[in-house]
Amino acid sequence: MTKKLYYESAYIQEWKTRIARKLERADGNYLVLEETAFYPNGGGQPCDLGWIDNIAVLDVVNEEEQILHKVERFPEHEEVDCQLDWNRRFDHMQHHSGQHLLSATCLEVCEAETLSFHLGEDYATIDIARPDLPQAQLMMLERKVNDQIYLNRKVTNYFVSQEQAAVLPLVKQPKVTDDIRIVEIEGIEYNACGGTHVSATGEIGMIKLLKAEKQKGNTRIYFKCGYRALNEFNAGMDILGSLSVKFKAAKDEILERVAKWDQEQKQIQAELNAVKAENDAYLAEKLLAERQGSLIQHVFADKSLKDIQNLAAKLTEQTDVLVLFMSNADHKVVLAQGGENALACGAFFKQHLADYGGKGGGSDKMAQAGFGTSADAEAFYHFTAQSLEG
């Protein structure tokens, strides 16, 4: 059985040991060490990474009390020097201890039990047994959990028997019956847990609650601790600074300036829509005057799909015509028909699009399709025109 140094101290970063076994598997090479401080995946906490004789450790798993270390290649020597990726380990310690503190505070403040914990590369989450959590209560929860961090409460861990565990006010009853590991936050909670933790809540640094959202009848809280929370703050300040420069406004004036800018954009868009409508009316008259037979066709250099759809709709509302448009801007083709024309636009596209590498569809009255290249769009456009003229 591998000796688990991370249970003796979460702060061991370097050590020497011997290789107990080497395993060659289909998915890679694995080492079993006599002693290891590499924590394996489990309990919502990702594994540690690092190096064994300067060879990268890619994964760490627990198989029947044997800790397996996936490595890029086997070391040359049986006695090896091991080193943790300490930044990763300490980040996990901050977040796992932060989760315990947050869950305990949720239980006290919200009367909500924690159902699950996940620590990802970007953020951590807990799911609590509560259908919702209003923003005001989320902020109150954040304040209270950070109050406990600043009190710098001692965090200890130790092993107890089943009989000793039975008299402790545990949050949940443990699944194991022997060598039950307890993580105790002084004055806060006793929790059966095998993860790595800081030695005092002050080392968590801070907890920032990012948001709360509904999740299958419960509430999921997203949060960051320690350096991740600091990085989140710094990223927000960078964005705020850029907006301040862009809008030529002090940081506390940005929301007011953005609201004014939004109103200006709505006014500009309204004026643009009016100009487009006037232009479309003129263009519709021109195309109707130039048509030969019942088909109106035209290739536009820079109109968007929405623009040519609107123009096609305006034409087919006015008279019983077939409209075929193409946009070179985004390789789109639109077919529309007005009145009682026997052509079903959507069915026509469905029948022929695949031959030209196009994707799309529509109703009997209007269909649209997109193509990977201008050449494909143009080929389908000419085929459709010839089919309708014939």
Image: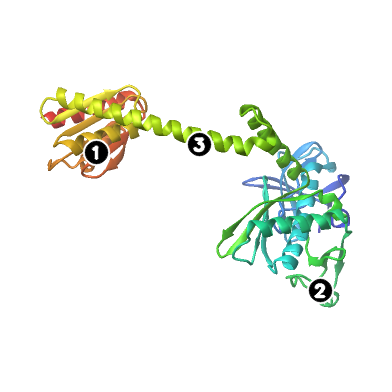
Residue at (15% x, 24% y) in the render: 289
Give the mark nearest the N terminus, 2 or 1.
Answer: 2
- Crowdedness near tag 1: few (<14), some (14–19) or many (≥20) residues, C-alpha within 10 Å: many
**Proximity of marks 3 and 1: CB atoms separated by less than 8 Å:** no
* Residue type, mark 1 in image: Phe
Q: At which x and y percent is residue 36?
A: 82, 51
Task: Tell me the distance, in whole angstroms, between the alpha carbons under discs 3 and 1.
Answer: 41 Å
Q: Is residue 37 among the parts visible in the rendering? A: no
| CA separation in Å, label 3 and label 2 | 57 Å
Give the answer, above or below, for where 357 lies relative to 148.
above
Q: Name the disc covering residue 295, or none.
A: none
Q: CA distance from mark 2 to mark 1?
A: 69 Å
Judge by depth and name the residue closer to the eye, 302 or 176.
Answer: 302
Q: Which residue is mark 2?
A: 169
Image location of residue 372, percent across then percent down: 36, 29
Label 3 with label 2: CB-CB less than 8 Å = no
Labels 2 and 1 touching (C-beta < 8 A) = no
Q: Amino acid at mark 3?
A: Gln
Q: Secondary structure at mark 1?
A: helix
The residue at which mark 3 appears reads as 263
Q: Is residue 24 above or below residue 154?
A: above
Q: For the residues carrying marks 3 and 1, which lies nearer the camera in this image?
A: 3
